[in-house]
Image (tube, rainbow, N blue to C red):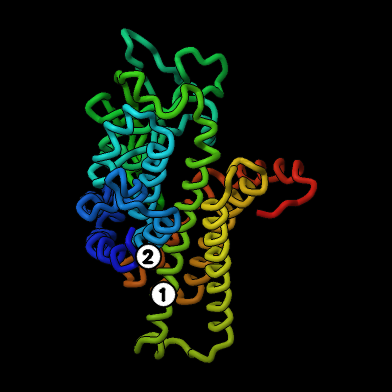
């Protein structure tokens, strides 16, 4: 990126399209195809690809900023964008020469939208083991992968798929494989009819096909290192930025309403209850913002992201952001009441953000991450803070 002005100009049309179709896609549960088209046209899908490889050369902080701004308009679109950036950064960091030469030019131009095929039935969101295995025949890798959730899978141009290497001796020797849509048969095996995040198109899918061995990303069986260095950290940063952006947008609309003619008629701006609730909401968001910025800085400077203090911080960001952003919007619903906090059709659309943010603690469960952090804390007797 070349600065905030360039970033803003690329975002402007994407935000206009997102705002225009957000209510419709939430109501129908449709994937936001127009917003994705605008992201392609703007080049934003190439944000994290280095400039010398044809991308925008954006930093991790740029990804966080863009995601948060998109989330003020529609949390679904923001998560779609952030998860694509996670996939793109993984290819940039780990793809070998042949795959880089084949994929990065188009990815850098923003022409490829990537979907992640990493979930498994019954795993609770765990990434570091797999129940499926790659086959091998005539120099090709044979894919047969079933996943309960593939965000944006029906619109993706390519997929990053976790599966066991053909010669894997344990369930933890997971490989990451790149597959173009024309290399696989992508079958939708169910619906996505959710309480919130309705426009993410997170349908269950089965992918079958064959790809050359050069399309393994990184070393065979080496997905664990990608999770600790790129995949996990960028997921937690992107999700947290999206949740914060959605909650900040909700607060902005509520404050605008309270300062407007109708709000001044209905609410006493000197009410201690109102002011206290606003203060609590703002404190929640400022807390998440500070933690998000600190974690971003730590990750950009860390030589080894796998050490316990960094992993603890990254996991804590996710759990705190999920809880605090949802609670902030819950308090806003209580503040403005039934008409603008609970009923559909309000221009403040708190009920949509409330439904969307209810997924935050479930999106790679906070309970699972708290167990991980408890174990890591026991190993860190000196309490080294990142």
Q: Is residue 364 left or right of residue 353?
A: right
Q: Secondary structure under badge 1?
A: helix
Q: Within 10 angstroms of label 2, few (less than 14), some, or many (20 or more) residues?
A: many
Q: Is residue 161 left or right of residue 321?
A: left
Residue at (42, 87) in percent of width and height: 266
The picture places residue 367, in percent across and down from the top left corner, at: 62, 45
On residue 265, which mark appears? Answer: none
Looking at the image, which is closer to me, 327 or 333? 327
Q: Secondary structure under badge 2?
A: helix
Rendered position, 366 above or below 264? above
Residue at (25, 40) in percent of width and height: 105
Instruction: Tell me where residue 277 sits by quadrant.
Output: bottom right
Rendered position, 30 above or below 158? below
Residue at (54, 88) in percent of width and height: 271
**How many discs appear?**
2
Location of mark 2 (residue): 72
The picture places residue 108, in percent across and down from the top left corner, at: 28, 45
The answer for how far apart the CA atoms under marks 1 and 2 are is 9 Å
Nearer the N terminus, badge 1 or badge 2? Answer: 2
Is residue 198 something that shows in the picture? Answer: no
Location of mark 1 (residue): 252
Looking at the image, which is closer to me, 347 or 385? 385
Question: Which image quarter is the N terminus in?
Answer: bottom left
């Amino acid at each position: 990126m070349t600065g905030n002005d360039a970033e803003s100009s690329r975002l402007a049309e994407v935000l206009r399209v997102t705002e225009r179709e957000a209510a419709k896609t939430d109501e129908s549960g449709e994937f936001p195809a127009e917003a994705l088209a605008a992201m392609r046209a703007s080049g934003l899908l190439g944000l994290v690809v280095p400039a010398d490889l044809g991308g925008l050369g954006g930093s991790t902080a740029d990804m966080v900023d863009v995601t948060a701004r998109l989330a003020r308009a529609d949390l679904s679109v923001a998560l779609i964008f952030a998860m694509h950036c996670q996939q793109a950064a993984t290819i940039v960091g780990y793809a070998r020469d042949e795959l880089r030469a084949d994929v990065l030019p188009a990815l850098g131009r923003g022409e490829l939208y990537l979907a992640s095929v990493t979930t498994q039935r019954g795993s609770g969101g765990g990434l570091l083991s797999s129940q499926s295995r790659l086959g091998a025949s005539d120099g090709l890798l044979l894919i047969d992968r079933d996943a309960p959730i593939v965000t944006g899978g029906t619109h993706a141009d390519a997929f990053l798929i976790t599966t066991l290497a053909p010669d894997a001796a344990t369930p933890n020797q997971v490989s990451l494989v790149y597959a173009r849509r024309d290399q696989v048969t992508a079958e939708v095996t169910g619906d996505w009819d959710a309480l919130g995040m309705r426009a993410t198109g997170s349908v269950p899918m089965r992918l079958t096909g064959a790809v050359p061995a050069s399309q393994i990303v990184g070393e065979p069986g080496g997905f664990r290192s990608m999770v600790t260095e790129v995949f996990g950290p960028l997921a937690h940063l992107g999700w947290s930025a999206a949740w914060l952006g959605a909650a900040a947008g909700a607060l902005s609309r509520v404050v605008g309403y309270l300062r407007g003619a109708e709000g001044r008629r209905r609410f006493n701006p000197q009410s201690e209850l109102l002011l206290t609730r606003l203060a609590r909401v703002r404190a929640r968001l400022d807390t998440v913002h500070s933690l998000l910025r600190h974690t971003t800085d730590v990750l950009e400077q860390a030589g080894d992201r796998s050490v316990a203090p960094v992993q603890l911080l990254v996991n804590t960001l996710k759990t705190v952001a999920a809880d605090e952003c949802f609670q902030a919007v819950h308090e806003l619903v209580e503040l403005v009441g039934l008409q603008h906090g609970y009923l559909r059709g309000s221009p403040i659309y708190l009920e949509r953000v409330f439904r969307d943010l209810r997924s935050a603690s479930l999106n790679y469960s906070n309970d699972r991450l708290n167990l991980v952090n408890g174990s890591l804390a026991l190993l860190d007797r000196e309490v080294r803070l990142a």
